[in-house]
């Protein structure tokens, strides 16, 4: 017997690995020919193919400039961001034309150190179909340079996905990483802005994060990241409630699938499962017209 | 065990008992038995989790044996033996007599570096008694470790030196990532490599496709299931195999390292 689980799934009309209920990945990435990665296209195809097998209905994605090729991943230059954002949207549009429906949605990634460029990118991106703003680690989350971006997000009714290092106890190389406390300060100044705290499983102490944001209802979290600690999802849902937790994969769809399976095993009711797998995402991204089996998803 | 196809003959890397650096939900043997049945895994080789941080693992071994007693049809003891302490052969014999299938060593926590004579002696003794030697590369992601958890990871050089020592010992490497697995496997002769088994739960699947690359380049034959329960979600290895591209398949059920003895 070879890859038995796949064979079972592939027997007859495909049963998706993560189940047939809708599933939305709110934290995805793609690569471009400008990232210095020779197999960039294989990477993108792998993400989409694995997503199909799992049953991911929508990938909400960003490209962090040149991924370090011509400017640092977490300090991308304006030119690299413009190229990446345009490429991301063109990729999403082309994929929609090919498939007849939209399964890839775009964030606008910006570097707050270049305020005018960030504003221009957000304006252009949202006009061209982007559904959210991506902030990584070019500036700490509580920096005043983020205020205009948070205002723009609220005004446009789009969320900010913010890269976070869970309990950043020191400075880490190559990024101005923020933790939950710092992101919380931004949320406190901008309560109308929906903020998605990235990858509770993406490194650091997620328990610290939960204490930091518990009382900040405008912050939700995504479950992505390579971390698959037992108990992580349980305490996250317990601390924040199932309406502030969104399933996602980030760089590792394998851990995303693991978490989708584990969600089924930790005793959630159907309503909570639906919220985490897709309904919260539909609410969070009102500009994204996401579908499942040809039907538009409505929260 | 339910009627679905078996996923693995054995989980070579499970523990029971509490973890010193965070709360772990119900790390108890009866829970592990239920998880194995759900995941279609025949049995598990089980260590006592606190032993890695205790100076003397002997008491932990006693607690392990007692806790596993009602579940020995499914759970085999994988006790720890510290070879830099006096009288370790006595403890090894006692554990083998009690039914140990593998012996755990924690070189990083015990300060035993690559090529340490005590580790080689333990490997020789394990080979003579036909039990595997189990090394845990890491317990948690580096970025989340407690400030007191400073031991670091087991180095690939430690594994290579043990495999090269010519003891004939079966080595199980748990918690290695792609780079370490490659560094170990391509740093050994085919004969040396034939005695090394790796679990793969820390290797990345799509879109990076690291696991697919390992299966293509190294072949699937050296991989075993090691879940690191109760620390990590047990579904990860199944997810990795399920997401393999068609040309990089892994035969199921995943084997037991004992089958090559």
Image: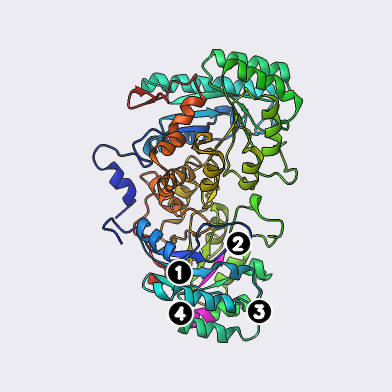
Residue lying farthest to the left in this orientation = A12
Using the rendered view, name the quadrant where residue A175 is placed: top right
Q: Residues within 10 Å of mark 2 (few under 14, many from 20)?
A: many
Q: Quadrant of the N terminus of chain B?
A: bottom left
**Which callout, 4 or 2, points at the residue further toward the start of the chain?**
4
Element class at badge 4 = loop
Q: CA distance from mark 2 to mark 3?
A: 20 Å
How far is disc 1 from disc 3 in space, using C-alphas?
23 Å
Assign a secondary structure to mark 1: strand
x, y percent for residue B71: 40, 72
Residue at the image point whose x is 29% and y is 59% from the top: B2
**How was this image coloured?**
rainbow
Name the element at disc 2. Answer: helix
Q: Which residue is mark 1?
A: B45
The disc, 1 or 3, on the residue closer to the chain's N-terminal end is 1
Between marks 1 and 4, how big is the CA–CA gap? 15 Å
Q: Give the distance between the C-alpha atoms of the residues marked 3 and 4, in whole angstroms.
A: 21 Å
Name the residue tied to disc 3. Answer: B84
Q: Locate the C terminus of chain B by quadrant.
A: bottom left
Query: Between marks 1 and 2, how big is the CA–CA gap?
Result: 23 Å
Q: Nearer the viewer, residue A34 or B74?
A: B74
Query: Counting residues from the N terminus, which is met first, the one under dot 1 or under dot 4?
Result: 1
**Disc nearest the viewer among 1 and 3:** 1
Work out whether residue B182 or residue B90 is closer to the camera in this orientation and state it: B90
| In this view, the mark in front (4 or 2) | 4
Q: Please, is residue A154 above or below residue A180 in the view?
A: above
Magenta residue check for B240: no
């Amino acid at each position: 017997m070879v890859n038995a689980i796949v064979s079972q799934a592939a027997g007859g009309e495909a049963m998706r690995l993560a189940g047939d209920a809708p599933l939305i990945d709110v934290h995805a990435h793609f690569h471009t020919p400008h990232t210095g990665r020779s197999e960039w296209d294989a990477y993108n195809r792998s993400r989409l193919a694995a997503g199909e097998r799992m049953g991911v209905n929508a990938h909400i994605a960003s490209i962090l400039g040149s991924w370090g090729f011509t400017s640092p991943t977490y300090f991308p230059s304006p030119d690299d961001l413009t190229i990446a954002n345009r490429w991301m949207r063109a990729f999403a549009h082309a994929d929609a034309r090919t498939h007849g429906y939209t399964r890839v949605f775009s964030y606008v990634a910006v570097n707050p150190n270049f305020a005018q460029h960030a504003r221009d990118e957000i304006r252009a991106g949202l006009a061209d179909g982007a559904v959210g703003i991506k902030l990584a680690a070019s500036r700490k989350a509580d920096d005043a340079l983020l205020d205009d971006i948070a205002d723009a997000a609220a005004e446009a009714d789009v969320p900010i996905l913010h890269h976070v290092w869970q309990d950043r106890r020191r400075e880490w190389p190559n990024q101005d990483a923020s933790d939950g406390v710092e992101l919380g300060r931004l949320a406190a100044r901008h309560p109308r802005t929906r903020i998605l705290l990235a990858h509770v499983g993406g490194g650091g102490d997620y328990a610290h994060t939960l204490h930091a944001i518990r009382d900040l209802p405008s912050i939700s979290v995504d479950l992505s990241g390579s971390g698959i600690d037992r108990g992580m999802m349980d305490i996250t849902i317990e601390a924040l409630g199932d309406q502030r937790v969104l399933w996602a994969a980030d760089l590792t769809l394998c851990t995303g699938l693991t978490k989708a399976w584990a969600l089924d095993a930790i005793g959630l009711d159907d309503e909570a499962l639906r919220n985490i797998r897709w309904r919260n995402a539909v609410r969070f991204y009102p500009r994204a017209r996401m579908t499942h089996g040809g039907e538009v998803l409505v929260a | 065990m339910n009627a679905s196809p078996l996923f693995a003959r054995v989980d070579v890397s499970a523990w029971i008992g509490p973890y010193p650096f965070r709360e772990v939900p119900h790390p108890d043997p009866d829970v592990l038995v239920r998880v194995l049945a759900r995941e279609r895994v025949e049995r598990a080789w089980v260590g006592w989790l606190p032993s890695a941080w205790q100076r003397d693992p002997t008491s932990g071994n006693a607690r392990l044996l007692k806790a596993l007693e009602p579940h020995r049809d499914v759970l085999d003891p994988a006790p720890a033996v510290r070879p830099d302490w006096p009288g370790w052969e006595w403890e090894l014999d006692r554990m083998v007599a009690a039914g140990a299938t593998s012996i755990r060593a924690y070189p990083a926590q015990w300060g035993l570096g690559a090529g340490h004579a005590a580790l080689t002696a333990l490997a020789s003794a394990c080979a003579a008694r036909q039990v595997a030697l189990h090394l845990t590369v890491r317990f948690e992601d580096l970025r989340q470790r407690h400030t007191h958890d400073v031991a670091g990871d087991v180095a690939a050089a430690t594994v290579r030196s043990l495999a090269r020592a010519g003891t004939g010992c079966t080595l199980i490497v748990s918690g290695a990532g792609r780079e370490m697995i490659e560094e170990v496997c391509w740093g050994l002769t085919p004969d040396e490599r034939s005695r090394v088994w790796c679990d793969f739960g820390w290797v990345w699947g799509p879109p990076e496709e690291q696991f697919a690359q390992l299966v293509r380049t190294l072949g699937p034959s050296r991989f075993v299931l090691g879940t690191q329960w109760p620390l990590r979600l047990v579904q990860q290895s199944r997810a990795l195999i399920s997401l393999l591209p068609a040309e990089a398949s892994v035969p199921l059920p995943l084997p037991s390292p004992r089958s090559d003895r």
